[in-house]
């Protein structure tokens, strides 16, 4: 018991999430039975989750840097379009002899485009100090615009045979793209927890001024992270391209809200510096199980969007309550009037009822 | 065209301030673009192009006005398109089921629904203390999803929808006839001008406007000054919602087609139009003139790329490019100034 308590105390978020995921999984298995817990459904879940998982990872990385990346979906689509042009033989004509060369060039084009998108974001944010939300808002529109200008809004079909096998290939009946996603998660977790770069990312997210005066080259950290985001997004584009076998502007628009949802659900702090890859993975499993259950139960897209929005607000609300309680406890035990509550001039039912010690958090200055 | 000196003089007489740098840049871009288009294709200089632009841009302008107020208060809102559609669609459904066929009723009802939804946003943002972006992303799907689930998404064609809206949408302030047909100025224009004046009055001539700028600059200091944060936020998001409600009805009447799945998804580009006008997400900054210029640029790209022989799919390319450029210039200058003053808050 003591050990469990210690575990919970050390990392409440992961534990809560794990319990939640397990219970949702058990509930789904109990209610939907074989329709949910069959190897076929699990396999299709693993296939579907891959590209979304990579996009969510990209969003999570940007939130670690106390930013947000609104351009992930449009960057992924743009890289898929650029790659699609190669794979459709529009740039280098495909002959029976050079198929595999063209395919590799196409794959490289997807990843390079992703990297370039990330580099543009990184340069805007690091070198020009544009706030991440604005920089990525601009690139979101710009990437979509470039994609539209290239394709004119029509879809780019992949004509090289064999490219779609990447999405359907399995290793011991586990989809290959799912394994790719897991590998990327593994690398991200390793870099974030075991390397200097990872430390710098967390430090920057926690307090960028302190990080600057600690001698960390912040600009470099930002650019590296956004390059990593770009590469991740490029891989998502690659999987997208291979899975659908074509690319079109406007594909996967609903991923943006879901990516933010899963990242916040996983306990990433939108103000930066907090968040674990493991909990992101758990959140992903949870979200995908629900998604798959919705498909089995035939919910229409509006119902889904309602549920996603409501759960985003719910999760955010619960986090807020936990945060408040933790703060109150800390203040009560220390008996230190840590930070004076900004007087709101308005009744404030959730916080500091009369006679209690004010309990405003230290990090939320809403800026 | 007046000369530059007169223009500057006029500007200072009218606005009682100097023009901001972003406004100057943006004005130069708008003028340069207009000149290029006019040079390439003289058809651009006709009155009907202007009328087209006004018709296309007035809805955007209404939303942009509300959004500027939100941005000045240091917040952000991406739920306004959902609010516009939800409030207008509920109004149309009510009119349909009660048999009331009156534009004023539609406006009133849509505005009040928008106001209430805005209040919901404000309360959530105030009490969850999270980035308003995340909260309003959530409420946008909740509002729109709830509407679609509870009320369905049946669309109304021109003959099925309340006829008063159709008449309202077809009516025009001024009409003139050319060899190509009749052109009219949209009825939405008085609403936009009204909203513009109202917003300007609120921002610059009331205590409330001062409070909005104050909480945008620093919420902490504002609350210590005794400004009611919740009250101000209720107004800000409520105002945004109310304008969105008006816009929803205008939008349906202008299109003469009630489609509850349209419009949602365009919020980020409208946000971009406001941002390009110089409003900063950190709050406390932003001018209505900048917003007007930003929306004009947006409307220009939307309606006049045809004159350059490019189809409208190039719109986002140009708009995004200009946005990135202006953001880059704006924040690079800020960065230089910050470095000089030893401010290290933004990396």
Image (spheres, coloured by chain):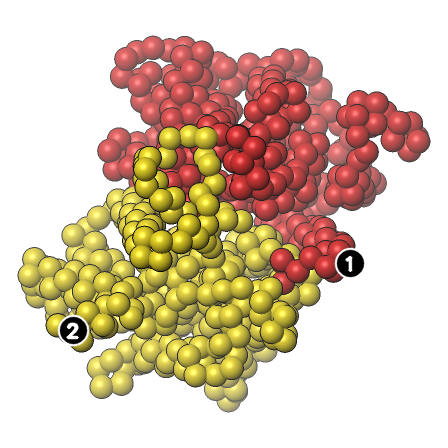
Task: Point out residue A224 in the picture as x, y percentages from the top left corner.
Answer: 57, 75
The dot on residue A45 is: none
Chain displayed in yellow: A
Query: Of A342 and B54, which appears nearest the observer?
Result: A342
Task: Tell me which residue sits at (45%, 81%) in the image.
Answer: A191
Q: Which residue is mark 1?
A: B340
In this orientation, does residue A97 appear? yes
Quadrant assignment for the N terminus of chain A: bottom left
Task: Point out residue B81 in the picture as x, y percentages from the top left corner.
Answer: 46, 36
Instruction: Tell me if residue B29 comes above or below residue A2 in the rendering.
Output: above
User: SS for tag 2?
Assistant: helix
Task: Point out residue A225 in the picture as x, y percentages from the top left corner.
Answer: 54, 72
Q: Which image quadrant for residue A86? A: bottom right
Task: Tell me which residue sits at (44%, 57%) in the image.
Answer: A270
Q: Chain of mark 2?
A: A
Task: Tell me which residue sits at (40%, 20%) in the image.
Answer: B112
Q: Chain of mark 1?
A: B
Instruction: Tell me if residue A68 comes above or below residue A242 in the rendering.
Output: above
User: SS for tag 1?
Assistant: helix
Chain displayed in red: B
Q: Which numbered disc, 2 or 1, marks the residue closer to the eye?
A: 2
Q: Is residue B68 left or right of residue B137?
A: right
Q: Which residue is mark 2?
A: A2
Task: Point out residue B227 in the picture as x, y percentages from the top left corner.
Answer: 53, 30
């Amino acid at each position: 018991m003591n050990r469990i308590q210690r575990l919970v105390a050390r990392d409440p978020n992961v534990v809560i999430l794990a319990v939640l995921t397990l219970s949702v999984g058990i509930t789904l298995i109990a209610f939907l039975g074989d329709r949910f817990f069959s190897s076929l459904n699990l396999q299709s879940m693993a296939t579907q989750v891959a590209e979304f998982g990579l996009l969510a990872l990209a969003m999570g990385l940007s939130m670690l840097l106390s930013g947000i990346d609104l351009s992930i979906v449009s960057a992924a689509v743009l890289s898929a379009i650029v790659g699609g042009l190669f794979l459709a033989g529009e740039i280098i004509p495909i002959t029976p002899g050079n198929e595999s060369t063209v395919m590799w060039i196409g794959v490289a084009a997807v990843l390079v485009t992703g990297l370039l998108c990330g580099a543009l974001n990184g340069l805007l944010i690091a070198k020009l100090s544009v706030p991440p939300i604005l920089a990525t808002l601009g690139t979101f529109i710009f990437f979509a615009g470039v994609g539209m200008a290239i394709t004119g809004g029509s879809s780019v079909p992949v004509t090289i045979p064999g490219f779609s096998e990447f999405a359907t290939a399995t290793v011991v009946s586990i989809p290959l793209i799912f394994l790719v996603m897991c590998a990327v998660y593994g690398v991200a977790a390793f870099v974030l927890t075991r390397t200097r770069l990872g430390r710098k990312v967390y430090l920057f997210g926690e307090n960028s001024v302190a990080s600057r005066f600690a001698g960390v080259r912040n600009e470099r950290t930002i650019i590296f992270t956004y390059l990593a985001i770009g590469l991740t997004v490029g891989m998502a584009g690659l999987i997208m391209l291979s899975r659908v076998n074509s690319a079109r502007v406007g594909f996967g628009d609903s991923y943006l809200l879901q990516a933010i949802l899963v990242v916040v659900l996983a306990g990433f702090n939108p103000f930066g510096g907090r968040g674990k890859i493991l909990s992101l993975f758990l959140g992903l499993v949870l979200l995908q199980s629900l998604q798959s259950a919705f498909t089995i139960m035939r919910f229409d897209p509006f119902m889904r969007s309602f549920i996603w929005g409501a759960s985003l607000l719910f999760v955010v609300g619960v986090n807020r309550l936990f945060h408040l309680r933790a703060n109150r406890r800390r203040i009560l035990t220390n008996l230190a009037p840590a930070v004076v509550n900004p007087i709101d001039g308005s009744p404030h039912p959730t916080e500091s009822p009369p006679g209690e010690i004010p309990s405003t958090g230290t990090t939320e200055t809403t800026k | 065209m007046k000369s530059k000196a007169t223009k500057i003089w006029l500007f200072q007489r009218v606005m009682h301030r100097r023009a901001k740098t972003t406004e100057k840049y943006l004005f130069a871009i708008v003028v340069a673009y207009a000149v290029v288009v006019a040079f390439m294709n003289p058809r651009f200089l006709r009155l009907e192009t202007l009328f087209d632009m006004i018709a296309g841009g007035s809805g955007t302008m209404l939303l942009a006005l509300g959004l500027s107020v939100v941005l000045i208060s240091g917040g952000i809102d991406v739920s306004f398109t959902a609010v516009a559609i939800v409030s207008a669609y509920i109004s149309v459904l009510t009119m349909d089921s009660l048999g009331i066929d009156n534009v004023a009723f539609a406006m009133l009802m849509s505005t009040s629904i928008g106001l209430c939804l805005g209040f919901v946003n404000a309360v959530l943002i105030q009490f969850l203390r999270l980035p308003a972006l995340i909260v309003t992303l959530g409420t946008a799907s909740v509002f729109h999803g709830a509407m679609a689930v509870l009320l369905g998404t049946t669309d109304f064609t021109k003959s099925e929808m309340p006829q008063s809206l159709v008449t309202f949408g077809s009516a025009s302030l001024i009409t003139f006839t050319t060899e190509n047909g009749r052109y009219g100025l949209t009825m939405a224009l008085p609403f936009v001008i009204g909203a513009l004046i109202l917003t300007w009055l609120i921002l610059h001539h009331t205590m409330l406007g001062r409070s909005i700028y104050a909480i945008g600059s620093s919420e902490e200091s504002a609350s210590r000054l005794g400004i009611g944060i919740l009250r101000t936020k209720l107004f800000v998001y409520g105002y945004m919602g109310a304008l969105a409600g008006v816009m929803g009805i205008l939008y349906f009447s202008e299109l003469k087609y009630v489609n509850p799945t349209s419009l949602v998804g365009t919020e980020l580009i409208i946000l971009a139009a406001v941002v390009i006008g110089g409003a900063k997400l950190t709050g406390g900054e932003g001018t209505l003139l900048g917003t007007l210029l930003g929306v004009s640029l947006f409307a220009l790209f939307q309606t006049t790329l045809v004159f350059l022989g490019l189809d409208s799919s190039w719109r986002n390319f140009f708009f995004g490019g200009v946005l990135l450029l202006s953001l880059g210039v704006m924040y690079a200058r800020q960065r230089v100034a910050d470095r000089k003053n030893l401010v290290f808050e933004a990396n």
